[in-house]
Amino acid sequence: MGEYKLRVPEGLGDILTDECAAKRAAESAIRDVFLGYGLKEVSTPTFEYLDVFSTGQNVLEQEEMFKLTDSKGRILVIRPDVTIPIARMTATNMKDQPKPLKLFYISDVFREISSPGQREFTQAGAEIIGDAGAEADGECISMAVQALKTAGIEDFIIDIGQVEFFESIIDQINIPGADKNRIRHFIKHKNLVAIEEFLDRKSVNGGLKDLLLSVPVLYGEVGKVLKQAREFPLNDGALRALEDIDRVYRITGEYGYDKYVSVDLGMVKELPYYTGIIFKGFTRDLGFIICSGGRYDHLQQEFGEGAPATGFAINVSRVVQALYNQNRQQTDENKRYILKCTAADRKKAINTAQKLRAAGLYIELCVTSSGIEEMKNYAVKKGVKCIITLDEGSRLKVTDARTGKQITTSVPGIVAGISSENSKCVLGWH
Amino acid sequence: MDRYLKIALAKGRIALQAFGLFESIGIDCSSMREETRKLIVRDPASMVEFILVKPKDVAKYVEQGAVDMGVVGKDTLLEQQPDLYEVLDLGIGKCRMVVAGTGESREHLDMAVKVVATKYPVTAQKYFSGIRQSIRVVELDGSVELAPIVGLSHLIVDLVETGRTLKENGLVILDEICPVSARLVVNRVSLKMENERITRVIKALRQTLGRAVQL
């Protein structure tokens, strides 16, 4: 018996009742949105061979993955990401299905070192495989907007970028890959001081220097930023990237979601597999990114079946945290009742409970000799608002656990109460 | 503007110098200077809230969104490599990150495995792997310059401002790793969600700093 008996590993945690309910509600809202766009759900194994994740593009650092060895000494990895297994799955088991494939998943992922506090978290993600067009990128961003809205998040932004904008500019300078990584790193951190020092050291001057120093600050409202960017002398690659952003932005506008979209041309590829449009979502009262995604046209090729692809994942655990911070967690307390009976009238109580459950209510049956006062205390502590007791015939008594106010009604009466808009509960609580 | 813009500062000299900068762009820091025991002080006129924390903790507050911005030494950023925007060199708290040792330490540079005492293990490992040398790090919390004198390590990696402490302890600088100064950092979400206010602060500070440099 060690000192860890009462602990859970860092970055993991129990999810207690209210949070769990909120999490499932968010997942279910997001699932409904994905289904509504015609996507189909898939699920990949909880662990897979390390080889799957050791792609040429090195998406995940080896120290980020939890590893196991099987009885034959092969190294397995506990699902650190879902996009890569889906690329494997679609390039093998689904390779003969008509494209584009539109898939989604809701899965737990595990990272050995990750953003603070999370070594296990839930991702709800969508992938569109076999569509190279802006249509697919625009649809992904619109789905992300709708999923976050439906999950209850308000006041959020989807910030989009295009990796080819920076990549084609930096290709104009003849420097080794390691130097490109450094300047990419500085751009990512909007570190203008370091960029300037770097460019001076490499004797990059004139228009190109001005442009590279502007890239990190070219962010904000899409129309305005694209206009500012076009004032610089840009090469074809960079211009194409701007046109791509414009096309995708217009699609989000057709959905009526453009007000949620902003642009950041200084958004560089953080994952080496990104090839085009990339985006991140964030909201007020949460300092972390809640969703991210983008186009990854070369990943499928790693598994032998080249196909353009784009997708994103919502970090459901963070969505729940944001809902909590914004005081928007959904509760199911209006559906929740305690049905108290004694052993003698249990059969009638069970019969009543089943009818109420069939109508979608949550009934905790308490077969007890305790009096109503005791039950009221119990209910208040548990956050249940009403106690139902059996009365003459098919009549039921409903007692407000807090005030003691009582009415006599019936099964249909209780059910009608929950379904009517203005009084969600029979006694008129809100 | 219903919400305070939160700025984390490292307690001590850097905070006092930073107040000077913030005052020059119209944020009132007088209550900060007066109520020195308080850890949170607000200026309702500019809707700015200052939070005083340990130097090592500033980047954590910013990265995790507990505050919107922070003033933090480049030494801490190099060591912790937090995921945030590093938008401005404030030009205060200037010093250098160096490798130092006793007079004989130059010989140690040729040893297969050197022992290096430091408060900055990541920075030390990075520097030595950059020059293709292996080291063993002894992580200390302070008075690092003692380590080579008492035989705890061959070398140290530490910050020096004037170099006087090193000299008084009979140590010499063997190499300079990088210059260090205080940086203005911004949470990645805040920069976008509070774009207007934060950009205004950055621009105003940049202007002030530009003037300071010209003087």
Image (cartoon, coloured by chain):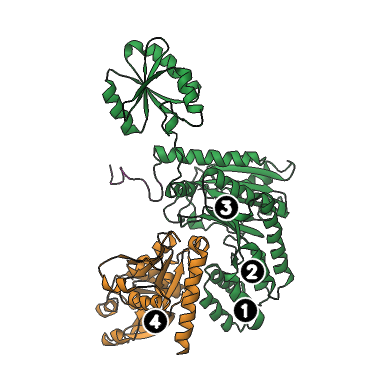
Chain colours: A green, B orange
User: Are dots 1 and 2 on a single chain?
Assistant: yes
Residue under the point 51% across and 77% down: A193
Residue under the point 46% across and 30% down: A423
The residue labelled by disc 4 is B94
Res. B101 visible in picture = yes
Task: Choose top left, top right, bottom left or bottom right for residue B18.
Answer: bottom left
| Stretch in magenta | A1-12
- Residue A205 vs A101, above or below: the answer is below
Question: In front: B31, or A215?
Answer: B31
- Residue A425 vs A58, above or below: the answer is above
Kindly report the distance in space between the C-alpha atoms of the residues bearing marks 3 and 2: 27 Å
The residue labelled by disc 1 is A210
Callout 3, which amino acid? Answer: Phe
Drawn side of residue A153 relative to residue B5, left or right:
right
Task: Classify mark 4: residues with Cα within 10 Å, few (<14), some (14-19) or many (20+).
Answer: some
Residue A247 location in percent, x, y?
71, 58
Kindly report the distance in space between the C-alpha atoms of the residues bearing marks 1 and 2: 13 Å
Kindly report the distance in space between the C-alpha atoms of the residues bearing marks 2 and 4: 32 Å
